[in-house]
Amino acid sequence: MGSNPTSSAITKDKGERIRDKVRDYPRLSPFFIPVMSEDLKVRTKNFAIRIIRLFALLPKTTEAQVVGKQVLRSGTSVGAQYREAQHAKSDPDFISKIEGGLQELEETTY
């Protein structure tokens, strides 16, 4: 500990500390989003497929079709909104788009 660390060792230590923080408390971070990205892409796509299959199984009554179409719209838009968030121009834009997807999820479960 008496020797002076090189500047690359200091940078590496700082990078490791940042990654540890992101791992312990995920926030908007370039280290976290790629990991989250693939998992949520798959999950939102699977969710949309399940919603489509559910809609196909509904009775053909007017009431079921009206409610079913709303569930179909809100349930399939979650993945689209998540993908839009991937291309957000800023952190507030990202948050806004993710919140839009969460609202659609809430509407779908209602």
Image: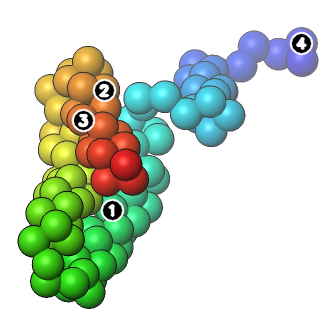
Left or right, 85 with respect to 35, comes to left
The x and y percentages for residue 64 are: 20, 71
Task: Decide: is 99 above or below 63.
Answer: above
Q: Could you classify mark 2 by the number of other residues whose Cα lies within 10 Å: few (under 14), some (14-19), or many (20 or more)?
A: some
Q: Residue furthest right?
A: 1
Do the residues under discs 1 and 3 have CB atoms within 8 angstroms? no
**Residue that carries the numbered disc 1 in the rendered image:** 44
Per the model, the C-alpha gap separating discs 3 and 2 is 9 Å
The x and y percentages for residue 53 are: 27, 83
**Residue that carries the numbered disc 2 in the rendered image:** 95
Front label number (3 vs 4) = 3
**Residue that carries the numbered disc 4 in the rendered image:** 2
SS at mark 3 in the image: helix
Hey, what amino acid is under mark 1?
Thr
Give the residue displayed 24% in from the left and 35% down from the top. Answer: 100
Hey, what amino acid is under mark 3?
Gly
Q: Earlier in the sequence, mark 4 or mark 1?
A: 4
The x and y percentages for residue 68 are: 20, 67
